[in-house]
Amino acid sequence: DYRNEALPALQVPGQWTAEGEVTGPVQASWLATFADSRLDALVAEAMAHNPDLRVAVARVEVASEYVNLADSTLYPQVNLLARGGGEMSGDSSGLQGVGLFADWELDLWGRLRSARAATTAGYESTVADTEYARQSVAALVAKSYFLAVEATLQHRLAGEMVTASEQLVALAEQRQRIGKGDGIDSAVARANLESYRDTVEKFSLARQQALRALEALLGRYPAADVEIATQLAAPPGPVPTGLPSELLERRPDVVAADQRVSAAFYRVAEAKAARLPRISLTASVNDISSDLFVLKDRDNPVWSAGASLLQPVYYGGALQTQVRIRTAEQKQAVAEYGRIGARAFGEVEDALSSEFASGRRAAILGRAVAENERALGYAKDRYRVGSGDLRAVSQQQLALNASSTALLRLQTERLVQRVNLYLALGGGFDAAPSPVAQAEK
């Protein structure tokens, strides 16, 4: 019912609408599909040392103890009182002795049970949030890793362009010496060389920054010293996407929002029950004596049992206001559930669309790079034999560099989008159960 309330205009289709979807259950252990042992080790390190995850795990421990605290309210509360200290006793009353007192509130209206259920749902929400945080950190490590590899390859590509430009400078200077060229060609060639050297410096900085960003996720000192692959991983095969109707039960962030709705419902029930009488059973046994005065008609020890009733009469409207507050919080939790659910569907559809669009673009850019390489070779040959000028060579060199850079950027983007798809589908990244899931059990 509350899903219909949260998403009144959202009709979940039987299949994903993005092209190229693959039917089948969503797979676990998506990290293994990249077949990179370095990446596996870095993700494991992040799971152990990422600062944000350490905070999230501590929140789970706190939420677990709150559940234990809520459980304790369902049981009798027993207190022991002792007095001593001579004739005047410890509090100057003149009484000495010991007493055992028990009090147990009968949860006739479900107030305490509702509070416990709300606390338990809050704990389940924290566990699911922490699991989603684990998946998000694993995805961030993978994406940062691919970006660092790309920066390394872009730096290498820029270095190759520097080498090619140095050869072009040497050719221009040689043509000038033998009288087939002039100083303009040599100056243009040297200017282009310096531009490519500047590009090398920029990619060197980008590589260091990418490595430091990765180290921050690992909880390491940002020394830009992480061992990474020398080539980008090949895009894994097609991804089974499951059914749209299964997404809301699988994604941890949606499950967390669902549990927050449950907690809000129980808080409303708790607030309503707080307006009703509280009935408690009481029992005590005590043994009291005095050296200061005689206790009249008293047999020790004294046993007693009874009951008490507390009926709220007038609180200035506080109890009814509390019900309205909890009801408003319930509406907020339902609306938040709808927002997160709608976002989850959108993220899957966007990731699927990007997945297949980038695949088509990769083929196009691959052909563009090959043709630019051929064209550059022709332009260099024409310049060597004197039938072409340096401008054509420079322009073709720029075109090759641009297409090669774009292809490398797209290859990285394909891997990043694949990680985004895995995260959007809510599949796990590790084969073993997460520590959070084990703690929940």
Image: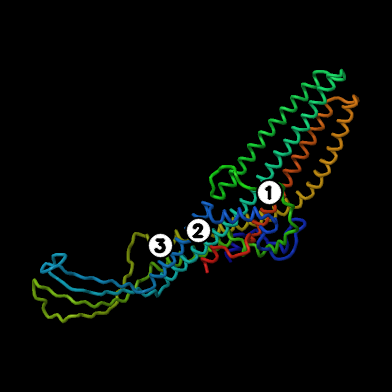
Q: Amino acid at mark 1?
A: Ala
At label 2, which amino acid type do we have? Val
Dot 1 and dot 3 residues touching (CB under 8 Å)? no
Secondary element type, mark 2: helix
Q: Earlier in the sequence, mark 2 or mark 3?
A: 2
The residue depicted at 14 percent of the width and 80 percent of the height is 298
Nearer the observer: mark 2 or 3; the answer is 2
Query: Which numbered marker is on residue 320?
Result: 3
> How far separated are the C-alphas under marks 1 and 3?
63 Å
| Depth check, front residue: 322 or 104 | 104
- Mark whose residue sits in front, 1 or 3: 1
Mark 3 belongs to which amino acid?
Gln
- 310 or 304, which is in the foreground? 304
Location of residue 390 by image quarter? top right
Q: Residues within 10 Å of mark 1 (few under 14, many from 20)?
A: some
Q: In the rendering, at what x and y percent does residue 396 appear?
A: 82, 32
Within 10 Å of disc 2 (Cα), the crowding (few <14, some 14-19, many 20+) is many
Residue 401 higher or lower than 429, as above or below: above
Tell whether 52 sits left or right of 295. Answer: right
- The residue labelled by disc 1 is 229
Q: Earlier in the sequence, mark 1 or mark 3?
A: 1
Q: How far separated are the C-alphas under marks 2 and 3?
A: 36 Å
* Displayed quadrant of residue 194: top right
Picture residue at 72% right of the left edge, 35% below the top: 159
Residue at 80% across, 43% down: 365
The residue tagged 2 is: 57
Please tell me whether mark 1 sits on a helix, a strand or a loop: loop
